[in-house]
Amino acid sequence: MKTPREIFLARHRAAEPKLNQIREAALSAMQERPAANSAAPGPAWRRVVSSLGDWLAVPWRELILSSRRVWTGLVVVWAVIIVVNVAQRDPGTHIHGSTANAPVMMASWREEQRLMNELLADRVTPPAADRPANSAPRPRTQRFGMAAA
């Protein structure tokens, strides 16, 4: 019994001479003009664009395509962070931080101020003698009462 590989090769055996002719024509064309690969024909800007494309293709292949799973994971993590951030945002807050319940906050702040004033009202201000004197610094000899010799 024939294997699938043998059946497949038998079908395409007739194309082998044609493929050999194409291969020989391509090789002879490459041997006739070896300098054709060194400089591309056409305007200079095409060569610059081509070299720029080659310059960008190498990092693309080595950095992005080689670690697609890592980049996909980073995208998923950032998407989750953005979704959680949007979900936790207060619907009443605006871009500049002002809130829709500002009068309520002002009322609670005034209440806190009133309570603070009540707590601090019974504090007695220290007499003038207890306050430290604000004086300009003097030389060390004058501070300790030493006379200069």
Image (cartoon, helix red, strand yellow):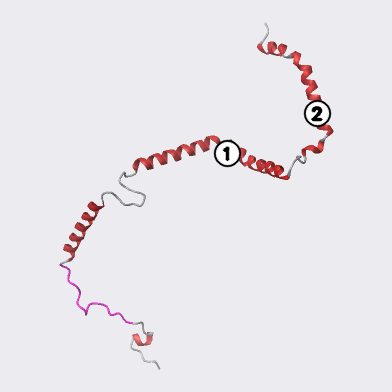
Left/right placement of residue 112 relative to residue 91 reads left
In the image, 50 versus 134, the foreground residue is 50
**Quadrant of residue 68 within the rendered picture:** top right
- Amino acid tagged 2: Leu
- Amino acid tagged 1: Ile
Residue 28 in the image: state x and y as whole percent.
Answer: 83, 28
Identify the mark at residue 64; answer none if there is no mark: 1
- Looking at marks 2 and 1 on the same chain, the residue that comes earlier in the sequence is marked by 2
Secondary structure beneath dot 2 equals: helix
Secondary structure beneath dot 1 equals: helix
In the image, 11 versus 62, the foreground residue is 11
CA gap between label 2 and label 1 equals 35 Å
Q: Quadrant of the C terminus?
A: bottom left
Left/right placement of residue 73 relative to residue 42 reads left
**Quadrant of residue 110 within the rendered picture:** bottom left
The crowding category of the residue bearing disc 1, from other C-alpha atoms within 10 Å (few below 14, some 14 to 19, many at least 20), is few
